[in-house]
Amino acid sequence: MKVIECVPNFSEGNNPELFEAIKESISKINGVKLLSLEPDADYNRVVVTLAGNEKGILDGTVSACKIAAQYIDMRRHKGEHPRLGAIDVVPFVPVANVTTEECVKISKDFAGIISKELNVPVYLYESAALKDDRKNLSSIRQGEYEGLEEKLKDPNWAPDYGEAVFNPKLGAIVTGSRFFLIAYNVNIKSSDVKHAKEIGEILRESGYAKRDANGNIIKVDGKSVKVPGRLKDVKGMGVALEKYNISQVSMNLTNYFVTPMHIAYEEVKKEAMRLGVEVNGSEIVGLVPLESMLQAGKFYTNGKESDEKRLVEVAIENLGLSALHPFKPEEKIIEYMI
């Protein structure tokens, strides 16, 4: 059986009526299963994880997105997380017996359907990108929803599907296929977000703009001079988490074989110590591959443990994955859910 994962991110983290409607819509579709639905009020965002066969994942994702479009109005949306629209990003991820190319085709089928049904512009990213400057999600999101109306006037930013017409209620959608991404946040015991932002800039692969002694950005030929970040295949930023009176280094680990969770966590700890703040555990948003948990367990046991259950327990303990809310392996590890 082919298993494809889809992780649509919707720009609404506070409306339980929407969450129930999404669950109900997916439950009516054959060949797809809802694995998790995780809202965050501070980010004002909900991350939904589905898994299914080729037809089931396409039908289930379209259904969930059409429901979200009924409830979300971007003209009233505020939140910590960058976003381009109500249905912000819809990645299709190969899990079992399926190739990236097949997932790219599904993402294009989705883009064709949803752009017509919702009258919304759609961009393709990552493996599905038709242009090099659209591979990176952050490039497409630049200017966010607030800058989208002007962006659509630029012929260079004509959507891949749909018309270059601003939809004030829904914004735009980004879809494509990518490797399994781990949305991983490390907690900083400080409500001052400046520490988390600095750590995110230092560690993320894209780095940060170099500044002179007066704090001005150094430019050469009109372009900012960049200082590369320390961790490959990592996107990162600092955000405030008001409900816990802390901040977070919010990271996307785009290839956990290149930079695994435990390395990201230990590097955040080093930088936090340098800045005089403490780390208090971490959290995984959405699901995580079993292999990533085993990597961490082996790291923290120096390779001396081989029992799967024990390795998972060690990973949870040493990464502090239950610091904010209980980490339940049967609900968070994708292989245990399918």
Image (cartoon, rainbow, N blue to C red):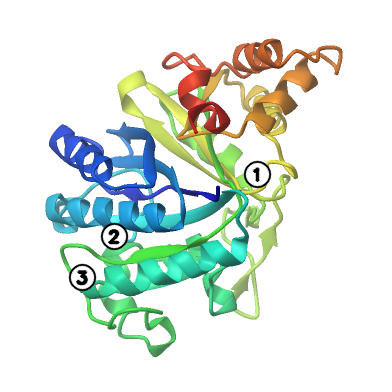
Q: Secondary structure at mark 2?
A: loop
Q: Residue 13's spot in the image, x, y percent? A: 25, 38
The tag earlier along the polypeptide, 2 or 1, is: 2
Q: Say if 5 sits above or below 116 in the image.
A: above
* Vertical position of residue 49 compared to residue 284: above or below: below
Q: Residues within 10 Å of mark 2 (few under 14, many from 20)?
A: many
Q: Nearer the viewer, residue 178 or 210?
A: 178
Judged by depth in the image, the label closer to the viewer, 3 or 1, is 3
Q: Is residue 230 left or right of residue 162?
A: right
Is 257 on the left-hand or right-hand side of 26? Answer: right
Q: Earlier in the sequence, mark 3 or mark 2?
A: 2
How many residues crowd mark 1 within 10 Å: few (<14), some (14–19), many (20+)? many
- Is residue 189 visible in the rendered image? The answer is no
**Real-space Cα distance between discs 3 and 1?**
42 Å
Q: Which of the two discs, 3 and 1, labels the residue nearer the N terminus? A: 3
Residue 117, disc: 3
Tell me which amino acid carries mark 1.
Answer: Ile
Looking at the rendered structure, which numbered label has been put on residue 202? Answer: 1
The part of the image, by quadrant, that contains residue 102 is bottom right
Of all residues shown, which one is farthest toward the bottom? 155
Which mark lies nearer to you, 3 or 2?
3
Q: Position of residue 293 (x, y in %)?
A: 65, 26
Residue 81 pos. (x, y %):
37, 46
Q: Secondary structure at mark 3?
A: helix
Q: Which residue is mark 2?
A: 85
Residue at point 66%, 13% (across, down): 309
Q: Secondary structure at mark 1?
A: helix
Residue at the location (49% across, 20% down)?
Answer: 330
C-alpha separation, residue under disc 3 versus residue under disc 2? 16 Å
- Left or right, residue 158 beside residue 28: right
Report the amino acid beneath label 3: Glu
